[in-house]
Amino acid sequence: MVVEDNPRYREVITLALKEEAEFELVGQFGTSEIALRSLHGKSPRELPDLILLDLRLPGMDGLEALPRFLAAAPQVKIIVLTQSDNGADVLRAISNGAAGYLLKSSTVNQISEGIRTVMGGGFLLDAGLARFILEALRTRPPQEAAEPLLTSRQMEILVLLGEGLQKKEIADRLKISYGTVDDHITHIYEKLGVRNAAGAVNKAHLLRLFPTHGNPARQT
């Protein structure tokens, strides 16, 4: 689903997605309110798997709408696609459950690859924003520790999630089964109270769970 108020840009994205055989566009809307209403009463199979969401929308903006989309369709993944390179917008979008954040300057190919990354269990951040956001996360004041604390294995997996690895890659790196990785990630999300990898990495930075050396959220 695409939620974008600029009809010209919406048409470009729509045409580009139609060129991808693995993607099916199930809806395009100019406001969050209409897009949210379209989800009401639908069965889980009828709901979109992913939403491309603009932030600067008439009426309810994307940041306000983001948690409402997740409430209406809990399994949906949301990629913010916007002109805003404001760090506060990025942090709030990730904290509210966005699985990715891309600028509209991204190419069609970058958007398509971003969709594949997110649908494969990863998360993405526009390369131009990554360094700024990581610095902002590191300089935030420490908050209360997560309860219960993550196990050492869960921390290993969380660090690899922060590096952008997907579940199969983590399983290969740690020489454990895919199912074991999946179970650990589920528990990580539950303990940190988040929905996805981006939220887990963000929360871990806020709680200062990562070691001070190295870069657990390296973008490639």
Image (cartoon, rainbow, N blue to C red):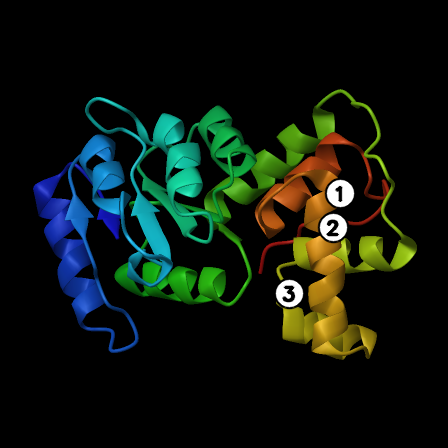
- Where residue 39 sits, quadrant-wise, is top left
Q: Residue at x 28, y 70 (%)?
A: 23
Q: Earlier in the sequence, mark 3 or mark 2?
A: 3
In this orientation, does residue 216 appear?
Answer: no
92 to the left or right of 72: right
Query: x and y percent of residue 29 in the render?
Result: 16, 43
The reply to whether discs 2 and 1 touch (Cβ–Cβ < 8 Å) is yes
Distance CA(mark 3)–CA(mark 1): 20 Å
62 to the left or right of 207: left
Secondary structure, mark 3, is loop
Q: Which residue corresponds to mark 2?
A: 188
Quick check: 135 above or below 172?
Answer: above
User: Alpha-carbon neighbours of circle 2 within 10 Å: few (<14), some, or many (≥20)?
Assistant: many
61 to the left or right of 217: left
Q: Say which of 44 and 12 sits in front.
A: 44
Q: Residue at x 68, y 57 (%)?
A: 161
Query: x and y percent of residue 151 in the render?
Result: 89, 52
In this orientation, does residue 177 appear?
Answer: yes
Q: Which residue corresponds to mark 1?
A: 191
Type of residue at label 3?
A: Leu
Type of residue at label 1?
A: Lys
Q: Residue at x 38, y 26 (%)?
A: 64
Type of residue at label 2?
A: Ile
Q: Which residue corresponds to mark 3?
A: 165
Q: Earlier in the sequence, mark 3 or mark 1?
A: 3
Q: Residue at x 72, y 70 (%)?
A: 170
